[in-house]
Image (tube, rainbow, N blue to C red):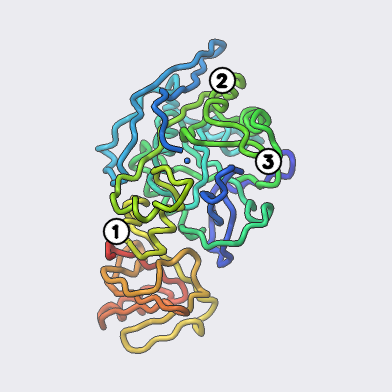
Amino acid sequence: MLAGGSRISHHLRECDPRLGLGLGFYSARVAELSCACPPKPSSTPILAATHHHHHRRLQRTTSSSSYSIHSKSPGDFSAFSGCFSHREEDYELPSEGLSPVAGGIVALGKFDALHVGHRELAIKAAKVGRPFLLSFVGMAEVLGWEPRAPIVAKCDRKRVLSSWAPYCSGMAPAEFQIEFSSVRHLTPRQFVEKLSKELGVHGVVAGENYRFGYRAAGDALELVRLCEEYGMEACIIKSVMDKNEYARNLNANDSKERGQVSSTRVRRALAVGDMRYVSELLGRKHRLILMAKDEGGLSSNGSRVSVPKSCLLNLAPKEGLYEKCSIVVGEEKSVACKVVIDITHVHIEMDEQGICNIAGNQDLRLLRIEFGDSV
């Protein structure tokens, strides 16, 4: 049982129409954080802490280069050099009374979008042990932020993480959550001590620009130093950089913009309706989920089904027409459709056969729409 009233959720299990669930740890770069749910890469070699029983040392690694955002197949992924001392080939589930992440490797970050940069953290964690994403809930409420729709619907996160399994040595990363209020005032040392003594974490993975602790007092190098002190392994990897030329114009006016893939970039791409760019950042198609409380929330007119925006469980792209879309039916089968988004509704247009497939195979109160690469 966690001290300090921490609440653990091993993974997100159900749809929640409430938007604005806060995930992430306190950072000076508040604009980069998302509800619901880093500086230009330095040329300084990345440091990683390794732990061999009673012997501790710092290992310098330089092979972790910046990556294009373009998605790679699992077989094409190039392994990072060994930040960790060994691979936990035979990971065992924690004994009763221990935390669910005991003995695992936790990726640290802000996981609103579950984009390709987040996936790289999970990939690295899986090369050493059982991978987890460590996130914090209740941040928006504690800090008084305006609620925002999540990029990934709460009920869809497990599916996304499961899709990462081929990249992560066949293991789907699980999410582990702690109430932000229980860690908000922890110093960097106290936070690492919590990971080690309370949660029993074996190691951590973070990006080179990761900040942690009260008022973002700790940086990646301090994380490595503290993990070494507490007998945990740590690996810092370089940011995944956005190579898209179009992105330079889209993010040019942001003083905090440094070129890495981020949840903020995904939100901006959705705001202009560039679904091809969104797909590149996410490493998958954006899936929009709508849940009506009852059949009265839906209306149909021939080949068109209309759903009010109040039914949205995550962030929709800007108003407009989107072709090359599909509705996911049953076990990930899809029916081609067009989507029109206006001020108040999401309209789904299908041919007659598509309407028949939807009506016969899916509860219309829950609609899952995937957007193709239209601009």
On the rendered image, what quadrant is the N terminus found in?
A: top right
Q: For the residue marked with disc 2, what is the amino acid?
A: Glu
Q: Is residue 232 above or below residue 15?
A: above
Give the mark nearer the N terminus: 2 vs 3: 3
**Which label sits on residue 183?**
3
Say which mark, if any, is on residue 197.
none
Separation of marks 1 and 3 at Cα, in angstroms: 38 Å
> With 115 as the anchor, is 322 left or right in this view?
left
Disc 1 or disc 2, which is closer to the eye?
A: 1
With 297 as the anchor, is 197 left or right in this view? right
237 lies left or right of 1: left
Q: Secondary structure at mark 2?
A: helix
Residue furthest top as drawn: 55
User: At 56% from the left edge and 36% from the top edge, which residue is drawn?
Assistant: 211
Identify the residue shown where x is 45% and y is 78%. 343
Q: Amino acid at mark 1?
A: Arg
Q: Position of residue 329 (x, y in %)?
A: 35, 68
Residue hosting label 1: 276
Q: Residue at x 68, y 33 (%)?
A: 187
Q: Residues within 10 Å of mark 2 (few under 14, many from 20)?
A: many
Residue 340 horizontal/vertical position (percent): 35, 77
Can residue 96 be seen at all in this image of the molecule? no
Could you tell me the amino acid type at mark 3? Val
Image position, residue 333 (x, y; %): 31, 65
For the residue labelled by badge 1, is the local secondary structure a helix, a strand or a loop? helix
Q: Which residue is mark 2?
A: 228
Q: Position of residue 290 (x, y in %)?
A: 46, 70
